[in-house]
Image (cartoon, helix red, strand yellow):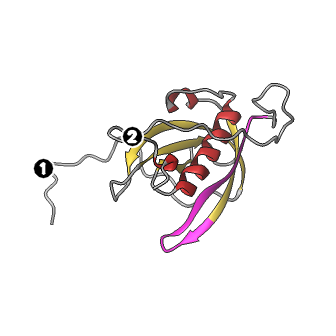
Amino acid sequence: MADLGGTYDATHGATMSDRTALPAGTYTAQIVKSERRDTKQQTGSYINLEFEVLDSEHPGRRFWTMLNLWNQNAQAVEIAQRELNSICHACGKLRVTDTEELHAIPMAVTLGVKSDNYGEKNIVKKYEQIGGASARPGAPAGAPAPTPTALPAQPGQRSAPWGRTA
């Protein structure tokens, strides 16, 4: 038994939304929340991005992705940088200092569905500007993103984890 500290009134307020995975496909979505979090092992940190679907049969539904930008695994960082580059291009903002600069900009996001021990979940397959245009002037649509730019090291580090040789 758990005492609620008085009478809980559920007559007002929202109820849970559908938490099943969205069907695979391309959606118009925007970033609505972003935050930097430490990894469970406290060996790095990542950016957690929350997206909201703007169109289709599922307006208002949410999905998430994590960008392991500060990690001991260089391959994880490279993958995260490519994903962040893709998001920046889809938003038309190639130089940002805060993820909040990428909020509320509609983009086309292609989702897949992956099953794990917890059930089905969405994974992002691709980000594009609405209409498929490229954010780089003169670059053809779908052109590869430039080589990732190194992010600053975490406080107390001499260099970023992916720049270390030992």
* Numbered label attached to residue 158: 2
In whole angstroms, how far apart are the C-alphas of marks 1 and 2? Answer: 50 Å
Give the residue furthest to the bottom.
117
- Residue 119: give x, y in percent of width and height: 52, 70
In the image, is residue 96 above or below residue 52? above
Look at discs 1 and 2 and give the one toward the viewer: 2
Along the viewing direction, whichever of 127 and 159 lies nearer the viewer: 159
User: Which dot marks residue 5?
Assistant: 1
Q: What residue span does the magenta drawing correspond to? A: 114-130
Please tell me whether the stretch drawn in magenta is mainly helix, strand or loop: strand
Can you give x and y, in whole percent of width and height, for residue 73 in the image?
A: 50, 57
Is residue 14 or residue 126 the one in the foreground? 126
Q: Is residue 54 visible?
A: no
Q: Mark 2 falls on what kind of element?
A: loop
Q: Residue flagged by tag 1: what amino acid is it?
A: Gly
Placement of 97 over or under 163, stated as above or below = above
Three-letter amino acid code at the position of disc 2: Arg
